[in-house]
Structure formats: structure tokens, C-alpha cells
Amino acid sequence: MNIERHQGGSCRLVFTRVAYRYLTGMADESLFDFLHMEIVSHVYKEQQSSKGEMDNKDRAVCVSVLESMGFRVGQGLIERLTRDSPSFKDELDVMKTNHQGTYVLQDNKFSLLTQLSNGKQYLDQAPKYLAFSCGVVRGALSNLGLDSVVTAEVSVMPSCKFQVVIQKL
């Protein structure tokens, strides 16, 4: 499957819509997995075709593009989930488990990494497959009124650790 630009829109818009539907239970997991792999590939190829060889700055641009796509999906997800609910702000204070506003989420079999490898073989490729997920969490929290920094760390695939730091106002 190759993702190409289509008339009147962008492959990014299509991916964002499929991701949103997957996260709300309206799309199949395998469709999202395949599309996620293709969009990551597309973003990197698009950046590389304009430059030739990619350096660290080009890779950072790609990660930023993927993270911003995830951010928008996270915002949309929270808009939908909270449409019929008043506000979660009071409940979020109860969720804090430490006083620094840092949360660590670990998934020992993160679905977007299981297609790549078990072990350390493609460890250097992991960040580009995690950028979108970081954006989803950051976008969701943003729509709940919480500014945050979300990072992901992988030491052995497909295990992944997300760190969410809530910014103090």
C-alpha cells in the first residue's frame, strides 16, 4: 500500500481520520497499524525527497509532523468523549499520584512496535513510530486544559515507556 496525495486533500488528513476512528472504536486495528506504518514512511520519504540525505534536523522535522498529527487526533478524541460530560478538571486533581505532575505509562507489548521487532534490532527506528502516540496524549490533555510534555522511551522492543509531565501554570 502506498499513500499518495489525492485531489482536494492530503494523505495526512486521511490518516488523521482513520486514527480518530480507530481510537474511538470505529475502525479495525490492523487498518490503523498498516496506515500508521505507511504514514511514517511517507512523511520520511517526503522530507528525504526534498533534501536527498537526511540529517538529525530533518528527522526532527519528521517527528514533529507526526507528533502534531497525533496532537490533533488527541484533541478530537477528547472533544468526542467529553461532548456529553461536563468537565473532568475536578476529577483530574484526584488522578495525580505525585506532587511533581509526572506520570509514567509502560506498555510491554506496544502495538505500533510489535510489527517491527522483538529485541534491539530496530531500536533506532522506534522514535518515529512513537511520535504520533505522544501527540495523541498531549492533544487529549491539552483539550482538558492541561499543558504537557510527552516523551517515549524504548530500551527493548516492543516494550515502551511514556513519560507525561504536566506543566504547572
Image (cartoon, rainbow, N blue to C red):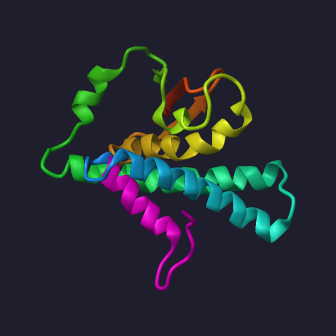
Residue 168 appears in the rendering: no
Give the residue displayed 26% in from the left and 36% down from the top: 89
Rendered position, 102 above or below 136: above
**Is 126 contained in the magenta span?**
no
Q: Is residue 89 left or right of residue 96?
A: left
Considering depth in this image, is 94 or 49 the residue closer to the camera? 49
Q: Is residue 131 left or right of residue 29?
A: right
Residue 102 percent across, percent down from the top left: 49, 22
Give the residue displayed 55% in from the left and 76% down from the top: 5
Give the residue displayed 69% in from the left and 58% down from the top: 44
Residue 60 percent across, percent down from the top left: 72, 50
Residue 139 percent across, percent down from the top left: 43, 48
Stretch in magenta:
1-22
Q: Residue furthest front?
A: 1
Give the residue displayed 53% in from the left and 32% down from the top: 114
Considering depth in this image, is 146 or 2 the residue closer to the camera? 2
Rendered position, 168 above or below 85: above
**Is 11 contained in the magenta span?**
yes
Residue 62 appears in the rendering: yes
Q: Residue furthest bottom?
A: 7
Q: Residue furthest top?
A: 98
